[in-house]
Image: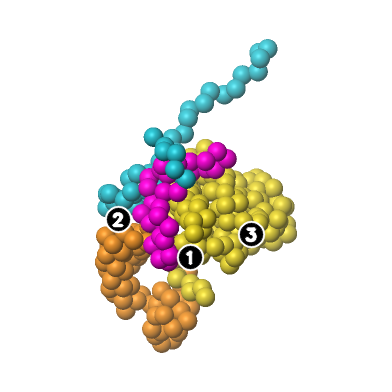
């Protein structure tokens, strides 16, 4: 398994935890412990994404991720071409 | 289990905090209303396991187990 | 405002080249109980529904359903991208191939195109949340049928994941319903 795929899977796992806590918090807005955990995952996610983007190109567009020459946002693989 | 009084929470002019905390099941329920139990978060799966299973919460993990069915036989065979 | 992240929510890996499944998976793309219907339903209902909890939840779950649309489309795309016309025909996708080669298009497993008639917005929060809960149950049941139809372990994993997400969404909509019920009760107190 390539390093790129391993890092991508790590990002998927952390982002999923943040998403689950996000949905939970939408109906449990006063759960402080959940908010703290969400923030921990959010900062871990930010670090992992920076690491991924430096080596393999941006994950987000519209100004949310830095772009590199020559606009590697366009580079393969696109998500539906990914082989895990 | 359920008491007779109509209103669970005191009247409150405070914004959203007026309805919290919400109990697991409401103490007074009405006919022709549906109630889903309110999740109480205790434990979480490790995150790699959570991604594979589809949820962070063991309480919500309800996997599908296929049943082995015999091929249907026609009645007069 | 929507931002797109260039990665799948879940690592999909298909082991077998079972092109028949591409036809059946279409129902979760453009069918009545599919991810596109779910996304459109929730993202549309969120404008007029009362309580911030419901607005937030419909926005967030609606966005997640768009990610699931991408997952279903990825599975269909990977199954059909290198298929020959003969293989498409044998898999029951001959008519699809005739119309559009290997391009995707939102329809159900029988080719009936997607329509906004697959969802509703009644404007009554209790009604709309019950529709959302029913939609999650319908999707869960369809995923069970799809799991029964395939032997590919990778595809089973992805379908189990999507089925479990429906269960979690049902729980969240149920909690939103409880909040709306409490909110409506509290409005009666002066």
Foreground pick, C1 / C159: C1
Residue depicted at 39% across the width and 80% down the height: A65
* Residue C49 seen anywhere in this rendered image of the structure: yes
Residue depicted at 34% across the width and 76% down the height: A53
Q: What stretch is highlighted in magenta?
A: B7-35
- Residue C66: x %, y % from top left: 53, 62
Q: Give the alpha-carbon distance from disc 1 to disc 2, as whole Å.
A: 28 Å
**Chain of the residue on which disc 3 is drawn:** C
Q: Dot 1 surroundings within 10 Å: few (below 14), some, or many (20 or more)?
A: some
Q: Colour of chain B?
A: cyan
* Quadrant position of the N terminus of chain A in the picture: bottom left
- Residue B34: x %, y % from top left: 52, 43
Q: Give the alpha-carbon distance from disc 3 to disc 1, as whole Å.
A: 15 Å
> Can you say whether B59 is above or below B18 in the image?
above
SS assignment at label 3: loop
* Residue B54 seen anywhere in this rendered image of the structure: no
Q: Which mark is residue C123?
A: 3
Q: Dot 3 surroundings within 10 Å: few (below 14), some, or many (20 or more)?
A: some
Q: Dot 2 surroundings within 10 Å: few (below 14), some, or many (20 or more)?
A: some
**Chain of the residue on which disc 2 is drawn:** B
The residue furthest bottom is A69
């Amino acid at each position: 398994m390539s390093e790129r795929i391993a890092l991508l899977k790590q990002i998927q796992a952390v982002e999923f935890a943040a998403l689950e806590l996000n949905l939970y918090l939408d109906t449990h807005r006063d759960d402080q412990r959940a908010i703290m955990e969400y923030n921990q995952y959010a900062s871990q996610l930010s670090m992992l994404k920076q690491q991924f983007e430096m080596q393999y190109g941006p994950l987000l567009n519209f100004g949310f991720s830095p772009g590199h020459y020559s606009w590697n946002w366009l580079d393969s693989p696109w998500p539906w071409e990914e082989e895990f | 289990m359920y008491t007779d009084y109509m209103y669970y929470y005191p009247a409150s002019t405070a914004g959203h905090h007026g309805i919290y905390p919400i109990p697991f099941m409401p103490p007074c329920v009405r006919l022709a209303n549906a109630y889903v139990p309110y999740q109480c978060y205790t434990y979480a799966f490790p995150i790699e396991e959570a991604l594979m299973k589809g949820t962070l919460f063991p309480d919500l993990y309800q996997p599908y187990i296929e049943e082995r069915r015999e091929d249907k036989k026609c009645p007069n065979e | 405002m929507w931002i797109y992240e260039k990665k799948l929510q879940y690592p999909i890996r298909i082991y077998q080249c079972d092109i028949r499944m591409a036809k059946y998976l279409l129902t979760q793309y453009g069918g009545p109980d599919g991810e596109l219907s779910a996304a459109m339903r929730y993202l549309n209902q969120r404008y007029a529904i009362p309580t911030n909890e419901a607005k937030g939840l419909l926005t967030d779950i609606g966005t997640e359903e768009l990610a699931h649309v991408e997952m279903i489309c990825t599975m269909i795309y990977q199954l059909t991208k290198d298929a020959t016309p003969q293989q498409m025909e044998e898999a029951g996708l001959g008519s699809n191939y005739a119309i559009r080669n290997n391009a995707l298009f939102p329809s159900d497993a029988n080719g009936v195109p997607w329509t906004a008639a697959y969802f509703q917005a009644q404007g009554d929060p209790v009604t709309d949340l019950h529709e959302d809960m029913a939609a999650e149950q319908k999707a869960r049941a369809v995923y069970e049928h799809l799991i029964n139809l395939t032997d590919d372990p990778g595809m089973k994993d992805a379908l189990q994941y999507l089925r479990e997400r429906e269960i979690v969404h049902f729980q969240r909509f149920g909690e939103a319903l409880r909040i709306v019920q409490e909110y409506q009760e509290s409005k009666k107190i002066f």
